[in-house]
Amino acid sequence: MSTLKSSALRTVDVARRAGYSVQQVRNLERDGVLPPATRSAAGYRIYGEIHLRSALAYRALAAGVGPVEAKRIVRTVHERPTSEVLALLDAAHARLDRERTDLKHAKEAASAISTEPIGDVRPSDSMGVSELAAALGVRPSTLRHWDAEGLAVPDRVPPRETRRYSPAQTRDARIVHQLRAAGYRIDQLRTLMPDLRHGHRSADVEAALAARDVSIAARSRALLDATVALGAVLAACRL
Protein backbone atom coordinates (compact mmCIF):
# COMPACT_ATOMS: atom_id res chain seq x y z
CA MET A 1 0.00 0.00 0.00
CA SER A 2 3.00 2.31 0.20
CA THR A 3 2.58 3.13 -3.50
CA LEU A 4 -0.57 5.00 -2.56
CA LYS A 5 1.62 7.73 -1.15
CA SER A 6 4.64 7.43 -3.39
CA SER A 7 3.27 7.39 -6.97
CA ALA A 8 3.92 10.74 -8.64
CA LEU A 9 0.95 12.23 -10.46
CA ARG A 10 0.52 15.62 -12.04
CA THR A 11 -2.58 17.70 -11.45
CA VAL A 12 -3.78 16.87 -14.94
CA ASP A 13 -3.29 13.15 -14.27
CA VAL A 14 -5.55 13.26 -11.23
CA ALA A 15 -8.06 15.40 -13.12
CA ARG A 16 -8.32 12.99 -16.06
CA ARG A 17 -8.55 9.84 -13.95
CA ALA A 18 -11.06 11.30 -11.50
CA GLY A 19 -13.21 13.00 -14.15
CA TYR A 20 -12.56 16.56 -13.01
CA SER A 21 -10.97 19.66 -14.46
CA VAL A 22 -7.52 20.77 -13.30
CA GLN A 23 -9.09 23.68 -11.44
CA GLN A 24 -11.56 21.38 -9.70
CA VAL A 25 -8.67 19.25 -8.44
CA ARG A 26 -6.97 22.35 -7.07
CA ASN A 27 -10.26 23.36 -5.42
CA LEU A 28 -10.60 19.96 -3.80
CA GLU A 29 -7.11 20.32 -2.35
CA ARG A 30 -7.95 23.83 -1.14
CA ASP A 31 -11.10 22.51 0.55
CA GLY A 32 -9.23 19.71 2.30
CA VAL A 33 -10.80 16.89 0.29
CA LEU A 34 -7.32 16.08 -0.98
CA PRO A 35 -4.40 16.22 1.44
CA PRO A 36 -1.81 18.92 0.65
CA ALA A 37 0.29 18.10 -2.38
CA THR A 38 4.05 18.16 -2.28
CA ARG A 39 5.86 20.56 -4.59
CA SER A 40 8.59 20.02 -7.13
CA ALA A 41 11.71 22.20 -7.17
CA ALA A 42 9.95 24.29 -9.82
CA GLY A 43 6.87 24.69 -7.62
CA TYR A 44 4.54 22.29 -9.44
CA ARG A 45 2.12 20.16 -7.45
CA ILE A 46 2.99 16.49 -7.07
CA TYR A 47 0.09 14.22 -6.21
CA GLY A 48 -0.01 10.54 -5.33
CA GLU A 49 -2.51 7.69 -5.47
CA ILE A 50 -3.93 8.83 -2.15
CA HIS A 51 -5.01 12.07 -3.82
CA LEU A 52 -6.58 10.22 -6.74
CA ARG A 53 -8.45 7.86 -4.45
CA SER A 54 -9.63 10.76 -2.32
CA ALA A 55 -10.99 12.50 -5.41
CA LEU A 56 -12.76 9.33 -6.55
CA ALA A 57 -14.22 8.76 -3.09
CA TYR A 58 -15.49 12.34 -3.00
CA ARG A 59 -17.08 11.97 -6.43
CA ALA A 60 -18.92 8.81 -5.37
CA LEU A 61 -19.98 10.32 -2.05
CA ALA A 62 -21.29 13.50 -3.68
CA ALA A 63 -23.72 11.39 -5.71
CA GLY A 64 -25.04 9.85 -2.52
CA VAL A 65 -25.05 12.65 0.04
CA GLY A 66 -24.40 15.84 -1.91
CA PRO A 67 -21.16 17.82 -2.33
CA VAL A 68 -21.20 19.64 1.01
CA GLU A 69 -21.54 16.51 3.13
CA ALA A 70 -19.16 14.60 0.84
CA LYS A 71 -16.44 17.19 1.46
CA ARG A 72 -17.05 16.97 5.17
CA ILE A 73 -16.71 13.19 5.20
CA VAL A 74 -13.53 13.04 3.12
CA ARG A 75 -11.94 15.84 5.16
CA THR A 76 -12.75 13.85 8.28
CA VAL A 77 -10.91 10.85 6.83
CA HIS A 78 -7.78 12.95 6.53
CA GLU A 79 -8.05 14.88 9.77
CA ARG A 80 -10.03 12.99 12.39
CA PRO A 81 -10.22 9.56 14.08
CA THR A 82 -11.82 6.67 12.21
CA SER A 83 -14.73 6.59 14.65
CA GLU A 84 -15.84 10.04 13.47
CA VAL A 85 -15.77 8.93 9.82
CA LEU A 86 -17.92 5.90 10.64
CA ALA A 87 -20.35 8.08 12.57
CA LEU A 88 -20.82 10.36 9.56
CA LEU A 89 -21.44 7.37 7.28
CA ASP A 90 -23.92 5.90 9.75
CA ALA A 91 -25.76 9.22 9.82
CA ALA A 92 -25.89 9.34 6.00
CA HIS A 93 -27.41 5.86 5.86
CA ALA A 94 -29.90 6.81 8.57
CA ARG A 95 -31.03 9.86 6.59
CA LEU A 96 -31.70 7.71 3.54
CA ASP A 97 -33.64 5.26 5.69
CA ARG A 98 -35.79 8.12 7.00
CA GLU A 99 -36.39 9.28 3.44
CA ARG A 100 -37.58 5.81 2.49
CA THR A 101 -39.93 5.73 5.46
CA ASP A 102 -41.24 9.22 4.73
CA LEU A 103 -41.83 8.32 1.09
CA LYS A 104 -43.75 5.21 2.11
CA HIS A 105 -45.94 7.33 4.35
CA ALA A 106 -46.37 9.90 1.60
CA LYS A 107 -47.60 7.25 -0.83
CA GLU A 108 -50.05 5.95 1.72
CA ALA A 109 -51.23 9.45 2.56
CA ALA A 110 -51.64 10.49 -1.06
CA SER A 111 -53.69 7.38 -1.71
CA ALA A 112 -55.80 7.27 1.45
CA ILE A 113 -56.25 10.91 2.47
CA SER A 114 -57.23 12.11 -0.98
CA THR A 115 -60.05 9.54 -1.21
CA GLU A 116 -61.53 10.03 2.24
CA PRO A 117 -65.29 10.71 1.98
CA ILE A 118 -66.32 14.07 3.32
CA GLY A 119 -69.99 14.61 4.02
CA ASP A 120 -72.38 16.39 6.36
CA VAL A 121 -69.95 19.28 6.75
CA ARG A 122 -70.94 21.88 9.35
CA PRO A 123 -69.34 25.26 10.08
CA SER A 124 -68.18 23.93 13.45
CA ASP A 125 -66.06 21.32 11.65
CA SER A 126 -63.63 23.95 10.36
CA MET A 127 -60.27 24.68 12.01
CA GLY A 128 -58.29 27.85 12.50
CA VAL A 129 -54.66 28.28 11.56
CA SER A 130 -53.35 27.69 15.08
CA GLU A 131 -55.54 24.61 15.58
CA LEU A 132 -54.50 22.99 12.33
CA ALA A 133 -50.84 23.90 12.81
CA ALA A 134 -50.89 22.22 16.22
CA ALA A 135 -52.62 19.13 14.80
CA LEU A 136 -50.02 18.77 12.05
CA GLY A 137 -47.03 19.74 14.16
CA VAL A 138 -46.05 22.68 11.93
CA ARG A 139 -45.81 26.43 12.45
CA PRO A 140 -48.77 28.67 11.60
CA SER A 141 -46.43 30.50 9.22
CA THR A 142 -46.00 27.23 7.31
CA LEU A 143 -49.74 27.00 6.71
CA ARG A 144 -49.79 30.61 5.56
CA HIS A 145 -46.99 29.82 3.11
CA TRP A 146 -48.93 26.85 1.73
CA ASP A 147 -51.94 29.14 1.38
CA ALA A 148 -49.90 31.70 -0.57
CA GLU A 149 -48.60 28.95 -2.86
CA GLY A 150 -52.11 27.63 -3.53
CA LEU A 151 -51.46 24.23 -1.93
CA ALA A 152 -53.87 24.27 1.01
CA VAL A 153 -56.12 27.30 0.65
CA PRO A 154 -58.58 28.03 3.51
CA ASP A 155 -61.77 30.03 3.48
CA ARG A 156 -61.63 33.65 4.61
CA VAL A 157 -64.30 34.43 7.19
CA PRO A 158 -65.40 38.08 7.53
CA PRO A 159 -65.19 40.57 9.06
CA ARG A 160 -61.48 40.06 9.66
CA GLU A 161 -60.97 37.61 6.81
CA THR A 162 -59.82 34.99 9.32
CA ARG A 163 -58.49 31.77 7.80
CA ARG A 164 -60.73 28.76 8.48
CA TYR A 165 -59.98 25.29 7.11
CA SER A 166 -62.92 23.11 6.12
CA PRO A 167 -62.49 19.30 6.34
CA ALA A 168 -61.58 19.19 2.63
CA GLN A 169 -59.02 21.97 3.06
CA THR A 170 -57.65 20.25 6.16
CA ARG A 171 -57.22 17.13 4.05
CA ASP A 172 -55.23 19.17 1.52
CA ALA A 173 -52.95 20.37 4.31
CA ARG A 174 -52.45 16.80 5.53
CA ILE A 175 -51.44 15.68 2.05
CA VAL A 176 -49.03 18.60 1.63
CA HIS A 177 -47.55 17.89 5.06
CA GLN A 178 -46.87 14.24 4.20
CA LEU A 179 -45.37 15.02 0.80
CA ARG A 180 -43.21 17.82 2.18
CA ALA A 181 -41.90 15.39 4.80
CA ALA A 182 -41.02 13.03 1.95
CA GLY A 183 -38.88 15.72 0.34
CA TYR A 184 -41.18 17.21 -2.27
CA ARG A 185 -40.52 20.82 -3.22
CA ILE A 186 -43.21 23.47 -3.35
CA ASP A 187 -43.02 23.68 -7.15
CA GLN A 188 -43.55 19.92 -7.43
CA LEU A 189 -46.56 20.08 -5.12
CA ARG A 190 -48.15 22.80 -7.20
CA THR A 191 -48.27 20.25 -10.01
CA LEU A 192 -49.40 17.30 -7.88
CA MET A 193 -52.05 18.88 -5.67
CA PRO A 194 -54.78 19.51 -8.26
CA ASP A 195 -55.01 15.78 -8.96
CA LEU A 196 -54.70 14.75 -5.32
CA ARG A 197 -57.22 17.36 -4.23
CA HIS A 198 -59.86 15.80 -6.49
CA GLY A 199 -58.99 12.25 -5.55
CA HIS A 200 -57.32 11.40 -8.84
CA ARG A 201 -54.19 9.21 -8.85
CA SER A 202 -53.13 10.25 -12.35
CA ALA A 203 -50.13 8.93 -14.24
CA ASP A 204 -48.28 12.17 -13.41
CA VAL A 205 -48.82 11.66 -9.69
CA GLU A 206 -47.71 8.04 -9.86
CA ALA A 207 -44.68 9.01 -11.92
CA ALA A 208 -43.66 11.71 -9.46
CA LEU A 209 -43.84 9.33 -6.51
CA ALA A 210 -41.97 6.65 -8.44
CA ALA A 211 -39.27 9.15 -9.45
CA ARG A 212 -38.66 9.94 -5.79
CA ASP A 213 -38.29 6.22 -5.13
CA VAL A 214 -35.73 5.91 -7.94
CA SER A 215 -33.80 8.91 -6.62
CA ILE A 216 -33.51 7.42 -3.14
CA ALA A 217 -32.42 4.06 -4.56
CA ALA A 218 -29.77 5.73 -6.73
CA ARG A 219 -28.35 7.70 -3.83
CA SER A 220 -28.37 4.62 -1.64
CA ARG A 221 -26.40 2.68 -4.25
CA ALA A 222 -24.00 5.60 -4.69
CA LEU A 223 -23.40 5.67 -0.95
CA LEU A 224 -22.67 1.94 -0.99
CA ASP A 225 -20.15 2.37 -3.81
CA ALA A 226 -18.64 5.38 -2.06
CA THR A 227 -18.13 3.41 1.12
CA VAL A 228 -15.88 0.99 -0.75
CA ALA A 229 -13.87 3.85 -2.28
CA LEU A 230 -13.67 5.59 1.06
CA GLY A 231 -12.42 2.41 2.71
CA ALA A 232 -9.38 2.43 0.45
CA VAL A 233 -8.61 6.04 1.36
CA LEU A 234 -9.12 5.32 5.04
CA ALA A 235 -6.76 2.37 4.96
CA ALA A 236 -4.11 4.42 3.13
CA CYS A 237 -4.38 7.34 5.54
CA ARG A 238 -3.88 5.06 8.52
CA LEU A 239 -0.63 3.50 7.23
Image (cartoon, grey):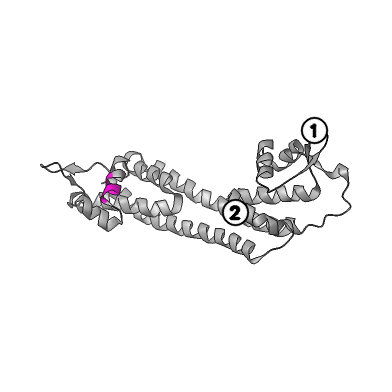
Residue 83 placement, left or right of 37 = right
Q: Which residues are magenta?
A: 22-26
Q: Earlier in the sequence, mark 2 or mark 1?
A: 1
Task: Please tell me whether mark 2 sits on a helix, a strand or a loop.
Answer: helix
Residue 136 placement, left or right of 3 = right
Say which residue label 1 marks: 160
Residue sitting at x 87%, y 42%: 124
Local packing at callout 2 (Cα closer than 10 Å; few below 14, some 14-19, many 20+) is few
Residue 8 placement, left or right of 32 = left
Residue sitting at x 54%, y 52%: 97
Relative to 113, does residue 201 appear above or below in the rendering? below
Mark-to-mark CA distance, 2 and 1: 32 Å
Q: What is the quadrant of residue 222 in the picture?
A: bottom left
Horizontal and vertical percent position of residue 129: 74, 38
Q: Nearer the viewer, residue 125 or 59?
A: 125
Amino acid beneath label 1: Arg
Task: Please tell me whether mark 1 sits on a helix, a strand or a loop.
Answer: loop
* Residue at far left of view: 41
Residue 195: say if magenta. no
Say which residue label 2 marks: 188
Q: Quick check: can you spot residue 133?
A: yes
Q: What is the quadrant of residue 125 in the picture?
A: top right
Local packing at callout 1 (Cα closer than 10 Å; few below 14, some 14-19, many 20+) is few
Horizontal and vertical percent position of residue 53: 29, 53
Contact? badges 2 and 1 (CB < 8 Å): no
Give the number of the disc on residue 56: none
Horizontal and vertical percent position of residue 39: 16, 42
* Residue at far top of view: 160
Q: Quick check: can you spot residue 184?
A: no
Residue sitting at x 39%, y 45%: 73
Q: Nearer the viewer, residue 225 or 81?
A: 225
Residue 122 placement, left or right of 17 = right
